[in-house]
Image (cartoon, rainbow, N blue to C red):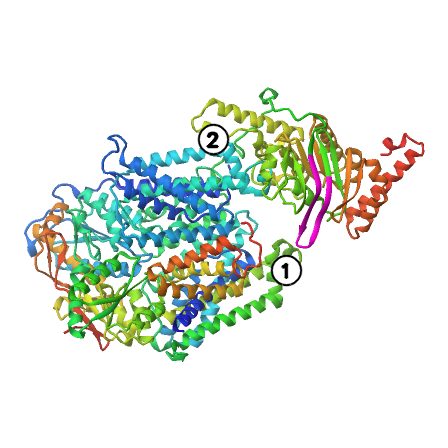
Amino acid sequence: MFEYSSLLTFIALTAILAYSFYAVLIAGQLSLAQVGLASLAAFTSSLVVPNEPLFGFIPPLMVGVVFGMAVGAIAAFVLGLPVMRLRGVFLAIATLAFGEMVRIFLINQSWTNGAQGLSFPKLVGIETAWIALALVAFWFWRLSGSRMGRAFAAIREDELAATTMGINVPRYRMASFVIAGAVAGLYGVLFAHFTRFADPNQFSFEAAVDGLVTAVVGGTTFFVGPLLGSVFLSALPELQRTLGIDAGWIRPAISGLLLLIVILFLPGGLAGLIPRRRSSTRLVSDPAALPQLEPLPARGTEVMALRALGKSYGGVRAVHDVDLTLATGEILGLIGPNGAGKTTLVNMVTGVTVPTGGSGTVLGIELAAKTRAHQLARAGIARTFQQIKLFNRLSALDNVLVGGYRISRNTMLRRLVFLPSARRFEREAAAVASAQLIRVGLGDKATTAAGDLSYGDQRRLEIARALASHPTLLVLDEPAAGMNHVEAERLSELIRSLAADGVAVLIIEHNVRMMLALCDRITVLNFGEVIAAGTPDEVARDPRVLEAYLGAEGDAAATAAAEELAEVAAEAVKGHDGDAAGTEGAR
Amino acid sequence: MQLFLDGIFLGSIYALFAIGFTLVFGILDRLNLAHAAVFSTGALVGIEVVTRWGVSIWLAIPIVFALGALLGVLIERIAFRPLAGRHDAHFAGLISSIALGAVILSVLQALYGADTRRFPAEAFPSTRLEFLGATFSLLQLMILVISVTLMVVLTWVVAKSKLGRGMRTIAENPHAAAVLGLNVGRISSTTFAISSALGAVAGVLFTLNVNAANLGIGHAVELKALAVIVLGGLGSLPGALVGGLILGLAEVYAVNTVGSSWRDMVAFGLLFLVLVIRPQGIFGGRKVREV
Amino acid sequence: MSARHLTAVAGGSLLLLALAACSPTPSGDTEAGGLVGAGTGADCVIEAEIPIAAAFSLTGGAAQYGSSQKNALEMAVDDLNEVGGVTYALTVEDDATDPQQAIQVFDGFISDGASIIVGPTLSNTAKQTDPVAQEAGVPVLGVSNTAAGITEIGDYIFRDSLTEDAVIPQTVAAAVEKYGLEKVVVMYSNDDAFTESGYQAFAAALEEEGVEVIETLTFSKTDTDFRALLDKAKQSSPDALVVSALVEAAVPLVTQAREIGIDAPIIGGNGFNSPALIEGAGEAAEGVIVGAAWNSASDNEQNVAFIEAYTERFDGAPDQFAAQAYAGMQIIDEAVRANCSGEREDIKAGLGEITDLPTVLGDVTINENRDAEHEALVQVVEDGKFALLD
């Protein structure tokens, strides 16, 4: 018992509460239910904590902690079922409402003694609090470099992209909720058994806001953030007292100003001040580290079959009656003017959009209302996006590591006990990711944040991320946009080599010349329907294709495509006229 | 009938707070949690002006309005503008506005102390009116009329005026707005100024109505106002009014059916249900966007 | 490392340094005999200053009570220091209406060698801070804690604030007698420890008197618009409204009750005993019956002087919180002088022996449960003043 022992204990306890907010914030969610969950755990624990060690050897506090964490986790799960589909402010307000409902419920119960509160035995001291904090911090430290941690980060950065990497977003969001609930329960039980007393009003909206402030001020991108936030905010009043600042209005004014300064000038929170490497993972360029990957299906295996597939929005038919097949080793091009429905079609194939008509099977999975993008990704489909969807705040290598989600293993539990296999698995995943990054020529930018890369590099990074999942079917949506002629040619080379390895490639691209040279078959869409299909030669000579492009007035890309198409067609005709040498050497 | 009117009048108070709150959210997509502090400021400064300077309430309201507008500009400049363009602007804005709100409240405590204060009894005529057997005060009626008028006027401003067009453009796409040559900074400031001016005046009316004001009154209403703007649809001005009235009625009827202990349970339960069933709220046409 | 990092690291180190530098070595005040003087009672002379520490809510939700407590305590210390012989050094700290802060403040007081701790403002805070002092063997005098179970925390915990149980039964009895009450509506804020225990006392007293409770209505301590509740109360046309609320709620509640036309008497507890009720509710406060631990209208000489001095010094009339804080210091002074010692153990012993000490609250005795006993009274608001109900 010394002067600062309570302060130090509160620092630990407040940090644990902040970790509970951190657990959802790292997955991009904002929950204000945490103190409500804590209070539920604290009050219910009073019903089960025994006076004597259980069975003679389990300490009463241990019973309370286990029970409280279970209550927190279960309550978070039950709360999560209805609110999980909400995002952002809506999730925050729904959880806030839940927290208030818990408070009102507890106030109106006789076993909690209502507003007069409940006494608890003092079972927690400074050591217990710091041991608990150390365990919680340890968990989040080990989480941050694991596959699970990367999945949370990916969801925070871009949910849609994460789901197309094979990450089951709803399940992970729920997992973060449940983890946060367990930590909140831990906090509640420890808090009540340290202060010896709790009344439901202590777990109010204000307390929830305080917890959130602590987590955000500390920073949510590094696991020590909550602790730093707690040290800062808990020590402030004590510091002001010891400095002899007059008790009264001046103190909250100073605290408010300091908080304002931190939040305005330290974007990453206090944790942003700690110098560290951008990425926890380093490039592994040693080919020996590469794991043995499962072989792709034999060449010519059908991986996609669409029958009369269609999608309508309201009465507008974005895509209709599309029949399409694709086999491994094949490169299928999809062209057509803007708004022809190419991206909608690709979205249906990758499970991002649910079809409204026809049927389709991709990698053995039926495209139905229940089909989720992450299931298709698990089955071996990988894609890039027309509008780049990278995890902007993650390093290039981390982006590709998330891409490798499908073929890597969850290492969280192994990491907790430092099993050597955890290191090995992490190294293998890093090796796969590194190889793809080097393959697209970004090896030297592995630690750069994706958002800081140039446009062309971002396109390449997206491709590397898609390749990292070792896909059977690769879907590329305008991969060459923004690339110059040389870069586009290099990309074509890459795609050909993938096809040669047995990957099935579905590609949308406006660069008609590139498509005609690259694809085995091309399908042309206009106004949502297939207007032509066949080999590049056949398509190039089909007058309906040229018409479609010319018909799309005011579309610069279409006009350019039409010009290219006309040129290529003319060349092809010339070639057929006998001057066979011209085709290849024209440019 | 009395119950119904009680609910309507209670709701119009919530709406008064919520209209300014939701204006900022609808246009700038930011929750300004310093709004509660502005509300308290309006109330306490209004009392000071009336009691100390002996100014009539009718002159005090414009003074408070102007002060609120000034505070709004300050809040925008200090707590929100420096965050523009930051990826975490949402969280950061919540917290910077909480921090600034705390500073404002402590300055108020320095100026006026922590005691509960009130307007002199004669500041506002305490006329009673009767309607279909139910009674209410002139002030209550006035608050309802002001809420409805504000809603209509603001909706018109946002929909039709030049300022409103600017606001809507910013709401849709701040980058595009800047490219189009709109002065995004000035429009944001104006929005905050209007919102805070209304918040401050709401504080005065609220205090007149309940005969009590202290530092915490803003926070007491804030939570309910959050519920109101979600019920009505985040960012929707008619939604704020209707949401306020619904909450007021729900609370009053809850008192008379399930009992007053569970009144707030009904309010928050309703909020929770609305979010789960129809997150965009009653009037929210907007897509539920990600934060 | 960028300049910004450097600044921040430097700032952080400064913060730590400041904490370390200011952390005092365990104070020497508690050395044996340092605070023991010669003589007894009025003749007692103690060389050293006796450190008195107080934790009140000066900011946050309960700030308005804390500030009048602080004022009164400072005034009491000044008055007592003028008497001579014994000097007190008062430290008042802010718990920000946050139990977590209060515990840390108590920790600081204990290690700084405070002889006795006054406070904290709220009962629920006291339930968390007082065990800390009890363990450290530092006496605590609560001057506003009215909830049950405070002094049960331990033998170092005393209070001079009457519990609701000591005030309310007599208030109810007096009101029943005066108005012949048969059926009443009870209203209280159920999310506050003080008002809820007040409610329990009311409920018990009403049952005792055989008064029927037609309806019990609850509200939140932050509520200010009570019209819906009052309309409901009005429907059952009670003989009286019985209200357990803090004064912030009391004023709007009373005003609104009169506004919607409830003319029945309104009966309140300790929370109503504040000049703010009369000042705030004005005409509407007329006829409100208030059970109280402090009689502001008492012609007790000490009390008159106290009100006069307080009003002059702080530009406003004192409330019951102020009176109880002032009396608290009077009680401490008596306990110190009894053994002529400012040592913790001696003060503790002295407090246990307080009998019929004249204070601004009247003659105070500390009973064997370490609770104060003194006359409680029933007041009624008449002509803008509190008057004894008779």
Q: CA distance from mark 2 to mark 1?
A: 50 Å
In front: mark 2 or mark 1?
Answer: 2
Numbered range of the magenta stretch: A304-323
Number of numbered markers: 2
Query: Both on one chain, marks 2 and 1?
Result: no
**Image quadrant in which the N terminus of chain B is located:** bottom left
**Vertical placement of A396 versus C45: above or below?**
above
Residue type beneath disc 2? Met
Q: Can the viewer see residue C78 in this picture?
A: no
Name the residue that disc number 1 marks: B182
Name the residue that disc number 2 marks: A412
Residue type beneath disc 1? Leu
Residue A108: image location, x then y, percent:
31, 55
Closer to us: A93 or B213:
A93
Closer to us: C32 or A1:
A1
Q: Residue furthest top?
A: A288
Quadrant hosting residue C57: bottom left
Closer to us: B29 or C316:
B29
